[in-house]
């Protein structure tokens, strides 16, 4: 019995001999688990930090501004459009003008600097999503983008094919690969 | 460590590596600061402008997406090109986004360039001008390419203020012989346009009108309007020339003649016409003159001079004689030899004899390039410069150091120490390299200007996008430096407005806006010109004492290329990558030699030969071509730059090095021929970068033709046998499936639409505009010379050319693209279903599903699938041209023609918004849109009324290798040939 553990080919001897590779394996597995926990469980929970802490909750929720006011092309183009700097100042020339973050927005405008918003909604590059078609079909923004009205910072959202296909199946929408999304 | 442990660790290591790959770099979404009125993200805005890639002046529409232009198309409202565009026009984009574009002014100090600001450069220019003007009259000169009336006027005004004369308009191809011939015969020196479409017989003495001659897109269209099949009739086109250009390959008969003998054939025809009394309606003095000059050219003499058999010559005359409305065109853009003037004059006289009213020559709508200076004037100018006559030389988009042969004096003139040379070029070409100051100005697609390709036409240019470099507009620069601070115009746009108001084109701001939207005003009251038939005193002597040609065993002809024109296209990767149609060679410049010439010298294709003329020598790869006369060698001009950016420099060869600097004395034209030349085998050889697998079809039913005689008896499609030649036309529709005899699988269900394309081979001229348009629209990778040699080019559409095995010089062109088969072999072999049949019949290639087994490519009988062996590069800012509607494919993925699915989707979107079906003809894939002759028809096969459905009922309809039962959705119409 002892031989099975301690002999030259026994379990413990093998273990000892391969001590370093095993430790390495253990450490890297631990590393991955910690990384995955941090990545999915913690870091992405509140969405990335934006250059200006714009709150969708305040604008779309509390103030009840329509989505289309800031994203005006959503019904006429593939892309909804993000508001130009001047559009923020339509209101913020009057409302909380002196607030430091609004001051920063004014600075962007005065120095003709585009605001570097961090992207939160991702679709892969080989997918050509058309907002117009979905709006024309009377789909509410929330059906895909969730309760934006309740979120301060938007959470990162990676749209996956299953999400699209489920809905397309349910609604008997276009399922052609190229005709619908890819080309 | 033993093997097992290693594998265990490697496994875990691999896993951890894979797990760490999920995170993507955070991307930033930049907002605009202020939104322009007309920009909707995701939607294109089209701006009308004018193409300036050659002097023809086609109207274009530039597609602007999010402030950058991604595609150029023809302007349908423009009378010159009517919505069509050639490959050089398509590639204009790669000038704007060229990675080698000069971004700041460069000042040469002690032989090195130093970057300076635009303001500094302008101040320096102003100072230099003032200093030079102070020294006396004529110390500042401008050499420019052909520019619009307004800019030319401004140059004139500026030079006036600087105490100098007119600007010199330099074009490497200035049609001197044709202009001189018109002056000798019609009494004025100009370049009238020709109404090819109204003729019923066309005879060209080499004029390459579908490639570069005067206005190629316009003439290609008019040619096919004339030469296309009308019912069961077809007009004739004969081409007399020592080599077959692409134009010549479209002729019903190519009369291969000895170089410099075209004039003899033309005079022989004149003599015959006199004999048959065709000249009787002309004034007597002209009758007599024609008789006198043509008298010596008997059929025997013509035959002896040209090598054309008397029977062939007789045939030529008979067809000319019996034609109702014959039109005779002169010599080609380049490649003109010692007798170019005589040939053009004889051609003019032939037109006069056969149609005394000259109804097919339009003397009012003349080509603008007529104002280009003759080569003799250009050389005289450079001689003056060499003598120190001027202090300041301004060069606008000209490259004499490349285009003029050695010994012309341009180079020595420009490098003079006491001469300050300013180049307005955007590229470091051979001439800019010699300049003291390079001050790049905006390119035509970024600027305000106006250019009428013909007299009596205003065609506007407006910025189709913002300037990438902050360079000034040439007009603004001239206004500031030329008219001084007290100028009455705010900017060049205001100057344009005034100029156009003065000549009555526009009255107010509203007209101006309308003008910009249409792209111009095309039917101005032009200065009417009528020919005056006054024969000059020199008239007879030109013919009676023609120079005696030196007998040469081998003569070199250098021809402008449809791809590079005079060389300005060589820095655009698409133009290098799309192969020359006749040779199918990309990137390289081969020397075309007749098989006999090769055999005599023990050479074979790909051998590098040393070509030597009296004026220079170079080493070129030989290409076996039955379409050149056995006494000539042909090389294309355009490549072989010693500068001009990464795509042009050191790529291909420049045969101008072999040309004589002397001029033809009577017309002041340069020689584009060099003879005699000596060929020497170097013993080395290279692999040519050619894209054709074979020159013949091996009787595989690929590019078919039918003779006009047999056309009414062409077999209908009803045969139902399975042999190669009895196989019926099987449309890609459910009703065409025959489960009894041919089909195992059930038909596809198509919903509302089944997209299909009809390709009329009879109309295809082989210009490759479609191929270039495809590169632009679909983000095709440019692979470069070495990869083309390896057969890894990415073209989704290519023009294949096939030789007739019986008569090798007879070529058939065939646009080959994905056939979108109903029974696609590619679909059934893919293990992951990446090729996929859509409900509208299109064969989809799902890039993200593809794992790169390449089974599909192996199984495709048409060999139209392209595999990405590498990650292709778009050096910045070329990447800005990429079409945002199309995925950029990466390494390991198969791709192929999609019938421009993005345009189909766009049409769907429009139709859905308007609650209707897609209209017939609404969708135009990029190739269909640009084709100058209307080869392609795209539409819905399920619609009984659609154009494609009507066309597939044609007797000429067939499917390439249809006997494989692939049921292609690309249906070809056979080419109609005429036995002469």
Image (cartoon, rainbow, N blue to C red):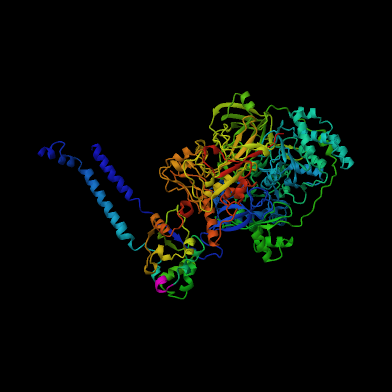
Q: Nearer the viewer, residue B658 or B686?
A: B686
Identify whether B293 is placed above or below B940: above
Q: Nearer the viewer, residue B962 or B295?
A: B962
Q: Residue furthest left?
A: A2
Find residue A25 and report its horizontal and vertical position in percent: 24, 46
Quarter occupied by the C terminus of chain B = top right
Q: Is residue A28 left or right of residue B627?
A: left
Left/right of residue A171 with respect to residue B163 in the rendered view: left
> Is residue B914 placed above or below B800 in the rendered structure?
below
Image quadrant where one finds the N terminus of chain B: top left
Main SS type for the magenta part? helix
> In screen coordinates, is B354 left or right of B213?
right
* Quarter residue B583 falls in: top right
- Residue situated in front as seen by the camera: B944 or B707: B944
Q: Position of residue A48 (x, y in %)?
A: 37, 62
Where's residue B630, x and y in %? 67, 28
B99 in relation to B602, above or below: below
Q: Of all residues shown, which one is farthest toward the front? A: B740
Q: Determine if the magenta segment contains residue A21.
A: no
Query: How many numbered dots are placed on residues in this image?
Result: 0
Q: Which residues are magenta?
A: A58-64
Q: Position of residue B692 (x, y in %)?
A: 55, 35
In the rendered image, residue A62 lying in the magenta stretch gets the answer yes
Regarding residue B689, the answer to whether it shows in the image is yes
Could one spot residue B435 in this view of the protein?
Answer: no
> Image quarter for residue B502?
bottom right
């Amino acid at each position: 019995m002892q031989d099975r553990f301690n002999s030259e080919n026994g379990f413990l001897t093998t273990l000892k001999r391969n001590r370093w590779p095993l430790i390495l394996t253990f450490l890297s597995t631990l590393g991955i688990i910690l990384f995955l926990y941090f990545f999915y469980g913690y870091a992405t929970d509140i969405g990335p930090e934006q250059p200006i802490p714009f709150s969708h909750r305040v604008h779309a929720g509390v103030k009840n501004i329509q989505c289309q006011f800031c994203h005006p092309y959503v019904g006429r183009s593939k892309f909804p459009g993000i508001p130009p700097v001047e559009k923020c100042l339509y209101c913020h020339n009057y409302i909380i003008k002196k607030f430091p973050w609004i001051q920063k927005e004014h600075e962007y405008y005065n120095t003709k600097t585009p605001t570097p918003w961090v992207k939160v909604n991702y679709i892969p590059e080989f997918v050509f999503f058309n907002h117009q078609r979905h709006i024309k079909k009377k789909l509410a923004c929330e059906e895909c983008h969730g309760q934006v009205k309740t979120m301060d910072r938007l959470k990162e959202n990676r749209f996956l094919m299953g999400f699209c296909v489920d809905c397309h199946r349910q609604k008997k929408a276009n399922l052609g690969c190229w005709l619908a999304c890819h080309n | 460590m033993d093997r097992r442990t290693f594998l265990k660790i490697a496994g875990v290591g691999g896993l951890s590596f894979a797990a760490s790959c999920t995170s993507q770099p955070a991307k930033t979404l930049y907002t605009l600061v202020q939104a322009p009125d007309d920009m909707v993200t995701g939607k294109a805005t089209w701006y009308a402008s004018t193409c300036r890639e050659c002097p023809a002046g086609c109207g274009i529409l530039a597609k602007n997406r999010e402030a950058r232009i991604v595609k150029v198309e023809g302007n349908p409202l423009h009378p010159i090109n009517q919505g069509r565009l050639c490959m050089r026009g398509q590639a204009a984009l790669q000038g704007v986004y060229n990675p080698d574009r000069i971004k700041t002014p460069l000042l040469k100090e002690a032989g090195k360039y130093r970057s300076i600001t635009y303001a500094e450069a302008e101040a320096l220019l102003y100072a230099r001008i003032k200093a030079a003007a102070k020294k006396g009259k004529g110390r500042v000169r401008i050499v420019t390419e052909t520019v619009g009336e307004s800019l030319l006027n401004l140059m004139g005004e500026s030079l006036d203020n600087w105490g100098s004369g007119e600007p010199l308009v330099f074009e490497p191809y200035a049609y001197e012989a044709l202009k001189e011939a018109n002056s000798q015969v019609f009494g004025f020196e100009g370049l009238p346009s020709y109404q090819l479409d109204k003729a019923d017989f066309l005879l060209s003495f080499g004029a390459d009108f579908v490639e570069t001659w005067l206005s190629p897109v316009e003439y290609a269209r008019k040619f096919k309007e004339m030469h296309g099949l009308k019912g069961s009739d077809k007009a004739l086109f004969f081409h007399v020339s020592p080599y077959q250009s692409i134009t010549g390959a479209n002729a019903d008969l190519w009369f291969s003649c000895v170089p410099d003998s075209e004039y003899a054939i033309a005079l022989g025809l004149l003599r015959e016409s006199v004999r048959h009394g065709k000249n009787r309606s002309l004034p007597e003095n002209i009758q007599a003159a024609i008789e006198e000059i043509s008298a010596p050219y008997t059929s025997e003499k013509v035959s002896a001079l040209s090598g054309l058999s008397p029977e062939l010559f007789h045939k030529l005359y008979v067809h000319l004689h019996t034609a109702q409305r014959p039109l005779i065109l002169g010599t080609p853009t380049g490649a003109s030899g010692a007798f170019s003037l005589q040939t053009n004059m004889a051609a003019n006289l032939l037109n006069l004899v056969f149609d005394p009213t000259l109804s097919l020559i339009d003397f009012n709508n003349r080509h603008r390039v007529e104002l280009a200076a003759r080569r003799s004037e250009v050389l005289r100018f450079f001689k003056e410069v060499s003598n120190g006559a001027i202090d300041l030389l301004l060069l606008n988009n000209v490259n004499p150091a490349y285009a003029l042969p050695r010994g012309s004096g341009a180079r020595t003139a420009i490098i003079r120490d006491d001469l300050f040379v300013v180049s307005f070029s955007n590229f470091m070409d051979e001439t800019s390299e010699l300049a003291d100051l390079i001050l790049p100005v905006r390119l035509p697609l970024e600027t305000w200007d106006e250019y009428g390709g013909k007299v009596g036409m205003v065609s506007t240019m407006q910025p189709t996008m913002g300037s990438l470099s902050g360079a000034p507009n040439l007009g603004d620069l001239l206004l500031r430096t030329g008219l001084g601070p007290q100028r009455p115009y705010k900017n060049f746009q205001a100057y344009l407005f005034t100029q156009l108001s003065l000549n009555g084109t526009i009255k107010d701001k509203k007209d101006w806006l309308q003008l910009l939207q249409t792209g111009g005003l095309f039917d101005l009251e032009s200065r009417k010109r009528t020919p005056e038939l006054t024969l000059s005193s020199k008239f007879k002597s030109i013919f009676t004492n023609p120079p005696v040609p030196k007998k040469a065993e081998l003569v070199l002809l250098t021809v402008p290329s449809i791809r590079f024109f005079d060389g300005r296209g060589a820095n655009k990767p698409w133009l290098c990558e799309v192969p020359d149609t006749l040779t199918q060679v990309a990137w390289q410049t081969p020397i075309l030699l007749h098989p006999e010439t090769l055999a005599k010298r023990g050479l074979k294709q790909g051998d590098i030969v040393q070509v030597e003329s009296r004026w220079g020598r170079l080493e070129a790869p030989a290409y076996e071509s039955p379409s050149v006369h056995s006494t000539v060698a042909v090389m294309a001009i355009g490549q072989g730059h010693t500068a001009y950016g990464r795509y042009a420099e050191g790529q291909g060869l420049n045969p101008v090095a072999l040309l004589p600097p002397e001029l033809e004395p009577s017309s002041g034209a340069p020689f584009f021929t060099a003879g005699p030349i000596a060929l020497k085998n170097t013993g080395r050889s290279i692999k040519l970068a050619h894209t054709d697998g074979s020159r013949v079809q091996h009787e595989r039913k690929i590019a078919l033709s039918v003779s006009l005689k047999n056309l009414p008896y062409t077999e209908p499609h009803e045969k139902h046998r399975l042999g190669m030649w009895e196989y019926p036309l099987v449309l890609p529709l459910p009703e065409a499936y025959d489960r009894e005899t041919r089909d195992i699988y059930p038909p596809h269900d198509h919903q509302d639409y089944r997209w299909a394309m009809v390709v009329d081979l009879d109309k295809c001229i082989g210009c490759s505009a479609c191929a270039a348009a495809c590169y632009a629209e679909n983000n095709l990778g440019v692979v470069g010379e070495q990869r083309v040699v390896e057969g890894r080019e990415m073209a989704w559409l290519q023009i294949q050319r096939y030789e007739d095995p019986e008569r090798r010089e007879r070529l058939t062109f065939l646009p080959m693209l994905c056939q979108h088969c109903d029974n696609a072999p590619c679909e059934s072999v893919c293990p992951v279903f990446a090729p996929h049949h859509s409900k509208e019949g299109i064969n989809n290639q799902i890039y993200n599903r593809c794992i790169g087994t390449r089974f599909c490519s192996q199984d495709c009988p048409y060999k139209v699938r392209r595999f990405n062996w590498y990650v292709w590069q778009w050096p910045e800012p070329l990447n800005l041209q990429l079409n945002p509607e199309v995925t950029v494919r990466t390494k390991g993925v198969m791709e192929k023609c999609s019938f421009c699915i993005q345009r189909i989707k766009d049409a769907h979107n429009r139709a859905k918004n308007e609650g209707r079906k897609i209209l017939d003809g609404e969708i135009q894939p990029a190739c269909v849109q640009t084709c100058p002759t209307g080869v392609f028809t795209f539409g819905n096969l399920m619609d009984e009324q659609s154009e494609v459905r009507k066309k597939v009922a044609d007797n000429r309809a067939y499917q390439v290798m249809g006997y494989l039962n692939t049921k292609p959705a690309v249906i070809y119409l056979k080419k109609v040939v005429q036995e002469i």
